[in-house]
Image: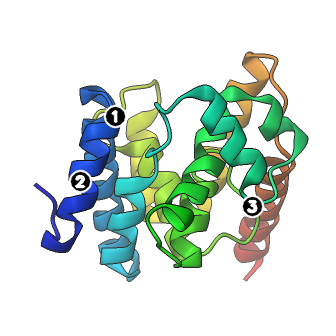
Amino acid sequence: MSRYEEFDEYEKLIEERLSKRRFKHSMNVAEECYKLAERYGADKKRCYLAGLLHDIMKEDLPDRQKQYTVDSGLNPDSAEIASKALWHGVAGGYYVREKLGIDDEEIINAIRYHTVGCAKMSLVEKIVYLGDMISEERDYKGVEEMRRYCYEDINKAMSVALIYQIQCVVGKCAAIPVSTLEAYNYYLQFNKEKEKL
């Protein structure tokens, strides 16, 4: 059951569009985003909604995912267009804007960048990116440490998360989107500057 009654229709929609496992993941991410928003003083309702909808295009037809990615106007680069695994983020941003009529730029961007990241992410965007990585059912090696970072220092957590993601992509010999590299460089520098203060 959704934390917010007004989002029940969205919950029903993702339940219809996703497998049981992916639906559970989406509910877990929404909950994690709510908790991170509470921890960092972000808008809990908007973080919850973005978390709930972040994978709305994940199990849609690949051709439609690609078409929405290309038509989105959300500036996917060639690495994103070439990688099927990345279409759902851009396509999801497009879907919530065009099909659900959600015109909140932070929510659209949080969904659009939840897989690849980007430099200078807003608090809502960082929360969705990290909430997706540490949701309750995640069990990859190092997830407990990642959870600790996420609740200690959100910007340090971004650096750690991006390093992890880049290593995974390199391990698969896949192309790294420009926005991911920009995010890595940005948070690396951001955290170095902070340590000097």
Residue 73 position within the rendered picture, expressed as x and y whole percent measured from the top left:
77, 62
Residue 104, compared with residue 131, is above or below; it is: below
Disc 3 marks which amino acid?
Leu
Q: Name the residue at 76% across, 70% down.
A: 190
Tell me the CA gap for discs 2 and 3.
Answer: 25 Å
- Residue at the disc numbered 1: 18
Residue 161 position within the rendered picture, expressed as x and y whole percent measured from the top left:
60, 45
User: Does residue 11 appear to the left or right of 155 in the view shown?
Assistant: left
Choose the circle earlier in sequence order: 1 or 3.
1
* Marker disc for residue 50: none
Circle 2 SS class: helix
- Residue at the disc numbered 3: 74
Q: Name the residue at 81% across, 17% down.
A: 173
* Marker disc for residue 11: 2
Q: Are marks 1 and 2 in contact (CB under 8 Å)?
A: no
Residue 7 position within the rendered picture, expressed as x and y whole percent measured from the top left:
23, 67
Tell me the CA gap for discs 1 and 3.
Answer: 23 Å
Residue 5, compared with residue 53, is above or below; it is: below
Choose the circle earlier in sequence order: 2 or 3.
2
Q: Which residue extends farthest top?
A: 172
Disc 1 marks which amino acid?
Leu
Residue 164 position within the rendered picture, expressed as x and y whole percent measured from the top left:
64, 36
Residue 1, compared with residue 163, is above or below; it is: below
Q: Name the residue at 82% across, 65% down.
A: 189
User: Does residue 11 appear to the left or right of 139 in the view shown?
Assistant: left
